[in-house]
Image (tube, rainbow, N blue to C red):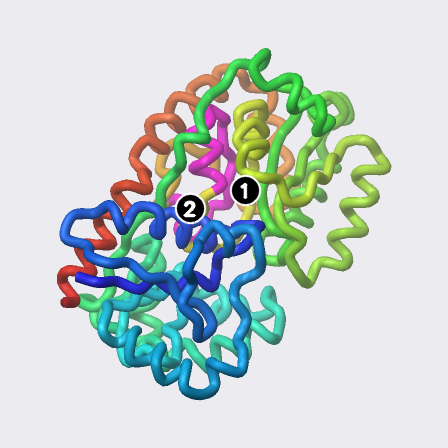
Amino acid sequence: MDVTIVVDALGPQLSGIGRYTWELCKRIPLEPNVGRVGYFANGTYVQRLDAVLNTRSPTPNWWSKGLWRHLAKRRLNRTLVHAPNYFLPREADTGIITVHDLSVFRYPETHPIERIRAFERHFESSLARALHVITDSETVRSELIVDFGVPESAVTSVFLGVTAAFHPREGAEIAERLAALGVFPGHYALCVSTLEPRKKIAELLYAWRELPAHIRNSTPLVLAGGSGWLNESLREQIRDGIAAGWLRHLGFVPEADLALLYAGATLFLYPSIYEGFGLPPIEAMASGTPVVVANSSCLPEVCGDAALYVDPNDIAGFSSAIAAALMDTEWRADARQRGLKRAARYRWEECAKQTVQIYRQCQ
């Protein structure tokens, strides 16, 4: 069985979808009965994945409009195509797609207009050509069946995983590097998220501002993640929090440093109202950090009994839950153990194995 994986989600700063794509690219060639594995983006076959990780994804060129596109189409359709980022290439007659979430359709106001237009042009065409659809959770699987009429037999949920980089660490082990980032082990709370509306970072900042002064000042909030979109007013809030001294904003953090940030945090917060899986809370759990998440979408399915759940739109209740979590050492110790146990369920090796099982069903 020869496979082509579409890698347009890869780049120097991996998003959740980019991480998913990268982990599949590393592991699927190692699975039994998988033959040659090729990689494809924007009408072009990719020769070196490490080059893609260090540059932008391949851009279309004049070759892709003529003979090269014809040759690419022939080559693609001799293999099983997997598009891990929603859309099958237009050169592919059929294939497998991964639908991570339906936020573009359920919360269109939280996305740039260009992304909405792209989904309007390509999503239903990809669904129509798909041999099978993979989702990250049963929650999104059910939504896809209801919202788009996909037959139950044509969609399978496959959980994502956690890399070995995310594990508990002693404070002394990470103190020097964290100091370079301006934080100290055990003396900050953490949120890892792009700055986009559905992540509810503005509500987190409002809730943090409502904390008693002695808690807010002794445990600063650290934000890490990509720049995002539709966030002009949020950036003003971030500047105000930084000026007040209770907020640190690190922007995108490479995985090596991110793993240390997770492990050094007293508490991890993820108030997103809609996710397809939610990698950051599970990475935090794997790092031994107690987790507070929104009580919505797939997060209860994925986090189970290992998280404290909040309504991020209830600012007073959200703030009270944060204060209680920061003050209750017994709860944090229990949440740490529950989180480690929960995170152990999610392995990229198992994700790749189940994905290849779906490939075989579609041969």
Q: Residues within 10 Å of mark 2 (few under 14, many from 20)?
A: many
Residue 284 is inside the magenta segment = yes
Residue at 67% from the left image edge and 20% from the top image edge: 184
| Tag count | 2
Image x and y of residue 46, in percent: 42, 63
Residue type (three-letter) at the residue carrying disc 1: Tyr
Please state, as top left, top right, bottom left or bottom right, where the C terminus lies in the image.
Answer: bottom left
Which region of the structure is painted magenta?
Answer: 280-300
The residue type indicated by label 2 comes to Leu
Residue 77: percent from left, percent from top: 26, 76
Q: Is residue 128 visible?
A: no
* Mark 1 or 2, nearer chain start: 1
What is the secondary structure assignment of the residue under circle 2?
helix
Q: Are marks 1 and 2 in contact (CB under 8 Å)?
A: yes
Above/below status of 308 relative to 353: above
Which residue matches tag 2?
299
